[in-house]
Structures are given as structure tokens and as C-alpha cells.
């Protein structure tokens, strides 16, 4: 473990630094001799803190108004910090929003996840020694919400899982050896800040919100904010690159890297063709596809088109295909309707665009009357600087949005008929590969979202099954030209070599067989795997074991 990292005469950026734990982080680093740039949307609080602290640490604190949902503001603020302080040595990605409500969750995702990615990438580019920088440290604040399953805020849980997985994948060897930049992760437990106020009004579901303070709050110990800030500074001084730390119950910060590492090694072993447990699962029931109405995103080509064709063979009533590719969608629809007359309708839609998605969803409901199943298949595997935000919008925000719309439409406790929502995650959520850390993070978010959302009493209340499909490398255009989709140009050749030598690419038809099996047989909350042309396997018990290990340490 690295010892004795010093912040004297270093420049530190703290996002969300105007109040709460962020303001305490600012003060810790100032006391230890750092200069601090505070980034926060709260201008009045930020300027007031700047003035007060500069009375003690003359000229060492500057405040920059910055909305971490806005890429232009993030870029502008970072450039101004570099201009004013001449360098950046430490970044603490602390800003966060704790709310899953319909009017807030998109903004929360932008702050909690996309904002972290953006500033991390900017920090690496500025600091990396192999491109003229001087090295440094980036601390990404995740949460125990990444380690536990909690039904009240599944979107928040997903965003924090994304932060953790993104950070542990991007930091893999030889990252530190090449760049001289440490990536660290802090998982805070419940902490006494304004984030916890009015929690009953922050859940995704009003029914759950009424119970959260009564059922959960008394059982969750809340630590002082000072304990959280002390733990983060201790981590900064002591932690090795790639470390994951925990701060709960006013205890000293604890390095939990080995526990997380053990769980992910078990996840990775599930994928290994020599050690995976391929077993028959006794299901509680069998879902009949006949005469069911489906919606499939990303359905115009690739796996989405195959899923559509396979479902039609099973006798479904109709399928609505959503895709941005109009020509391909219309061509496929015409082709399939010659075989299955009137069963397929195409809707051009960018699922990453909320306005488009809402409009198209309402049109689908108007045309079909009732949806029985949604397959959130649309995905983009692209971490390049020009495309990663669009990828996250499709892979994460679009999936969440359509899931919530589907639940609202289907839930039996509000007059619906129940149904099934299958969210396509990836083996990228279960393994650590350094080439596409943003994609890995987004798929980890999907996995944790599904696990949390589907917890009791979700199915009992709604009659809606949430299924998660972890798809391995499959022979589709998603794997074409991967070198151009990496976050770091230096890994272009490495990812091509990795794909050709380490990855067993399965046929697309195997994935289509798997999706039909999962929809027919999957229990609510189950996690399924499709790799190496093997039959779909229910891996829920293995994932559950990993999360039980996480939850044991998270509960102190």
C-alpha cells in the first residue's frame, strides 16, 4: 500500500464543495496545506465559504459556479482552475443528488454518474505523466448504495454502482504505471447531511416513500459528516491506486478492496467456461408468450431484430420496434409483416432523448392498448470522447425511463395487468476490463438498478417481473472497430488483441435463444447469463452471494 501521500502545495478540486461533506473535505485539505477550488451550483453558499476560509488560508480558496450536469460548464470551470492555479493535482468528485423522483432522477444521474466521468477524464488528461503531466489523485465518491440492495432508490443505487465499477476498471494495471494517476473510490454510508432530509419524498414510488422512514430509517445508523471527511482524507494519504474504501457508523475509514475483489473474482469465474455452473433451474412458473404484446428497443438490426423474429415465432400478438435507424426499421418491419401480417410496427425513436421516448411510448399505447412486455435492448458500446455521453444516455437513462414508464403502465395495483420488463446488461457488469470503463459502469448500473427495483414487495404490489440479462460477447456490429471506441487511444491495439485472444464470441442466434428462455422461465429479480453459445443460465444465486458479502461489510 502507498503511504504518506501529501497534499501540501497541491491544487485540489472539490465538487459539491460549498456545503455538507464537500465543505468539510475542502477544510481538511486546506489544513494540510493544499490550495482548493470549490465547484458547486450553489453560488451564494460557495462565495460565502470562499470568503470565510480565505480569512484563515489567505488566497488559497477559489469558488467556481458549476452545474455538474452541464458539460460546457464543467469544461469551462476546469480550464479556469488550471488557468488560476496553473495545475490540478487532486480531484474529489463529491457532488451528488439523492433522489429518484420523476422530476429529479435524470438530473441526479447526470450529477452522480456522468459528471464524475467527465471530470475524471479531464483530470487524467491533465495529470497523466505519459503526456507531460505530473501525476495526481482522483477520488470518486460512490456509496454503500453500490454495495447493497435497497428498493427505495434503485436509480441512485445504479448510478453509484456505475461510479464504483467505472473507477475500478479504469484504474486497472498498467493505468497507474503509465499515467501516475491514482483512482480511488469512497463508499459513504448514511451520513448526517441535508441529503437525508425528507427521504420519504425522494423515492421513485410514492407507496414505498410512505414506508421508508418507518421501516428503514430506524435501522440505519447515521454517522457524523466529520467522520466521513476524516475517512476520505485518511484514504487520500494511505490508499494504493484502485482502492475502494468504506466509511460507516463513525468508524475509521476501512479499505474494502479485497472484499470487493473477491466478489468480482467469483463473478468473473461464472463466465469462465471451465468453472461456470451450468445447471437446470426449477422455475416457479412458465410465462406464455402467445398473444402477448411486446416493445423492443434497438430492434431494427442486430440482436434486437433477432429477438423480434424469435418472439414472432413463439406466437406473440404484436411487437413495437423502437430504433433511431428509420431505413433499417422500416425495411425489417416490411419483411416481417410479409410472414406475420400486421404483427410488427416500427417507431423511429432515439431512446436517449426523453421527449422522443415519451412521445413514442404514448403512441405505442394508443395503437396497441396494452403492453405485456418490454425488452430494453438498445445499446451503444463507445467510450470515445465524442460519444460516451450519448452512450450513457441510451444504455442507462433511456433504459431507466422506459422501465419506469412500463411499470406505471403495467402495475396491477394501479389498474394495469402486470407484465415483464427485461433489461439488457452485459458481462461487462461482472468483469473488470480497462478498455471500456464507462460502458462497464453503465452496465453495472443496469444490474444494480434491476436488483434493487425488483426487491419485495415490488412484484407483490405491481405484478411486474424485472429480469436482467447479462450478455457476453456476441457476433454483432457492436464488436466492429472497437479500437476507435476506447476512452484512451493508447489502448486501441490492446482491445483488438484482447478480443481476438481472450474472448469467446458467441453466435447472435444463441443470444436470441437465451432471451426467449429467460422471458418464459425467469423469476422476478433473476439475473441471467448468455456466453459461449451455451444455454442461458440463471446466475442469481452467485450474484446474491457476492452482494451478501458486500452487505456484510457495509453494515459494519
Image (cartoon, grey):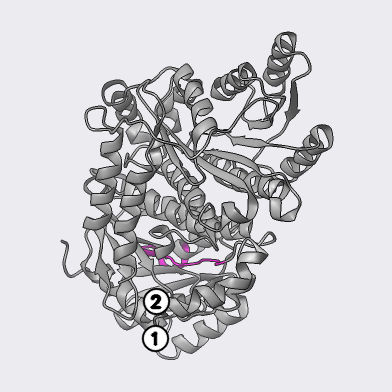
Residue 243, quarter of the rendered image: bottom left
Q: Secondary structure at mark 1?
A: loop
Mark found first going from the N terminus, 1 or 2: 2
Q: Is residue 85 magenta?
A: yes
Instruction: Name the residue rendered at 30%, 79% in the picture.
Output: 33
Q: Is residue 268 magenta?
A: no
Q: Which residues are magenta?
A: 83-98
Q: Can you give x and y, in whole percent of width and height, for residue 142 in the image?
A: 41, 62
Q: Can you give x and y, in whole percent of width and height, for residue 27 in the image?
A: 39, 82
Q: Can you give x and y, in whole percent of width and height, for residue 144 in the image?
A: 39, 64
Query: Can residue 406 be seen here?
Result: yes
Residue 57's tag is 1
Looking at the picture, does residue 483 appear above or below residue 124?
Answer: above
- 93 vs 502, left or right, is right
Query: Can residue 202 be seen here?
Result: no
**Front label number (1 vs 2):** 2
Amino acid at each position: 500500500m502507498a503511504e504518506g501521500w501529501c497534499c501540501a502545495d497541491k491544487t485540489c478540486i472539490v465538487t459539491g464543495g460549498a456545503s455538507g461533506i464537500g465543505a468539510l473535505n475542502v477544510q481538511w485539505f486546506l489544513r494540510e496545506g493544499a490550495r482548493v477550488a470549490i465547484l458547486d451550483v450553489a453560488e451564494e453558499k460557495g462565495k460565502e465559504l470562499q470568503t470565510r476560509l480565505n480569512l484563515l488560508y489567505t488566497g488559497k480558496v477559489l469558488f467556481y459556479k458549476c452545474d455538474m450536469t452541464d458539460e460546457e460548464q464543467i469544461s469551462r470551470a476546469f480550464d479556469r482552475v488550471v488557468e488560476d492555479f496553473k495545475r490540478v493535482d487532486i480531484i474529489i468528485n463529491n457532488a451528488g443528488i439523492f433522489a429518484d423522483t420523476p422530476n429529479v432522477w435524470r438530473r441526479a444521474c447526470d450529477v452522480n454518474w456522468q459528471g464524475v466521468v467527465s471530470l475524471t477524464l479531464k483530470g487524467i488528461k491533465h495529470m497523466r505523466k505519459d503526456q507531460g503531466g505530473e501525476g495526481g489523485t482522483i477520488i470518486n465518491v460512490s456509496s454503500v448504495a453500490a454495495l447493497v440492495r435497497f428498493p427505495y432508490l434503485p436509480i441512485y443505487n445504479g448510478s453509484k454502482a456505475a461510479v464504483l465499477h467505472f473507477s475500478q476498471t479504469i484504474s486497472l494495471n498498467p493505468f497507474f504505471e503509465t499515467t501516475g494517476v491514482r483512482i480511488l473510490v469512497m463508499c459513504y454510508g448514511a451520513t448526517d447531511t441535508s441529503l437525508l432530509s425528507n427521504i420519504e419524498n425522494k423515492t421513485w414510488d410514492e407507496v414505498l416513500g410512505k414506508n421508508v422512514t418507518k421501516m428503514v430509517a430506524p435501522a440505519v445508523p447515521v454517522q457524523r459528516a466529520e467522520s466521513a471527511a476524516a475517512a476520505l482524507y485518511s484514504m487520500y494519504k494511505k490508499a494504493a491506486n484502485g482502492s475502494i474504501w468504506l466509511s460507516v457508523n463513525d468508524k475509521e475509514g476501512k479499505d474494502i478492496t479485497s472484499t470487493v475483489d473477491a466478489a468480482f473474482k467469483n463473478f468473473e469465474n461464472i463466465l469462465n467456461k471451465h468453472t461456470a455452473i451450468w445447471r437446470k433451474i426449477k422455475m416457479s412458473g412458465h410465462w406464455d408468450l402467445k398473444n402477448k404484446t411486446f416493445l423492443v428497443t434497438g430492434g431494427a438490426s442486430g440482436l434486437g431484430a433477432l429477438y423480434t423474429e424469435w418472439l414472432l415465432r413463439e406466437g406473440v400478438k404484436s411487437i413495437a420496434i423502437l430504433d433511431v435507424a428509420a431505413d433499417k426499421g422500416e425495411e425489417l418491419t416490411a419483411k416481417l409483416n410479409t410472414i406475420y401480417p400486421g404483427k410488427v410496427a416500427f417507431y423511429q425513436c432515439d431512446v436517449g432523448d426523453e421527449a422522443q421516448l415519451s412521445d413514442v411510448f404514448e403512441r405505442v399505447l394508443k395503437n396497441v392498448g396494452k403492453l405485456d412486455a418490454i425488452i430494453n435492448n438498445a445499446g451503444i458500446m463507445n467510450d470515445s470522447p465524442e460519444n460516451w455521453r450519448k452512450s450513457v444516455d441510451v444504455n442507462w437513462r433511456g433504459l431507466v425511463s422506459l422501465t419506469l414508464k412500463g411499470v406505471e403502465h403495467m402495475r396491477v395495483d394501479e389498474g394495469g395487468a402486470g407484465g415483464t420488463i427485461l433489461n439488457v446488461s452485459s458481462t461487462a457488469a461482472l468483469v473488470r476490463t480497462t478498455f471500456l470503463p464507462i460502458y462497464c459502469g453503465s452496465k453495472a448500473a443496469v444490474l444494480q438498478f434491476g436488483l434493487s427495483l425488483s426487491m419485495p414487495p415490488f412484484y407483490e404490489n405491481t405484478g411486474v417481473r424485472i429480469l436482467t440479462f447479462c450478455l457476453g460477447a456476441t457476433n454483432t456490429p457492436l464488436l466492429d472497430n472497437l479500437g476507435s471506441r476506447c476512452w484512451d487511444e493508447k489502448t486501441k491495439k490492446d482491445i483488438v488483441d484482447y478480443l481476438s485472444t481472450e474472448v469467446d464470441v458467441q453466435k447472435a442466434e444463441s443470444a436470441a435463444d437465451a432471451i426467449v428462455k429467460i422471458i418464459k422461465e425467469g423469476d422476478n429479480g433473476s439475473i441471467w447469463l448468455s456466453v459461449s453459445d451455451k444455454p442461458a443460465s440463471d446466475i442469481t444465486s452467485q450474484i446474491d452471494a457476492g452482494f451478501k458479502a458486500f452487505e456484510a461489510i457495509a453494515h459494519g
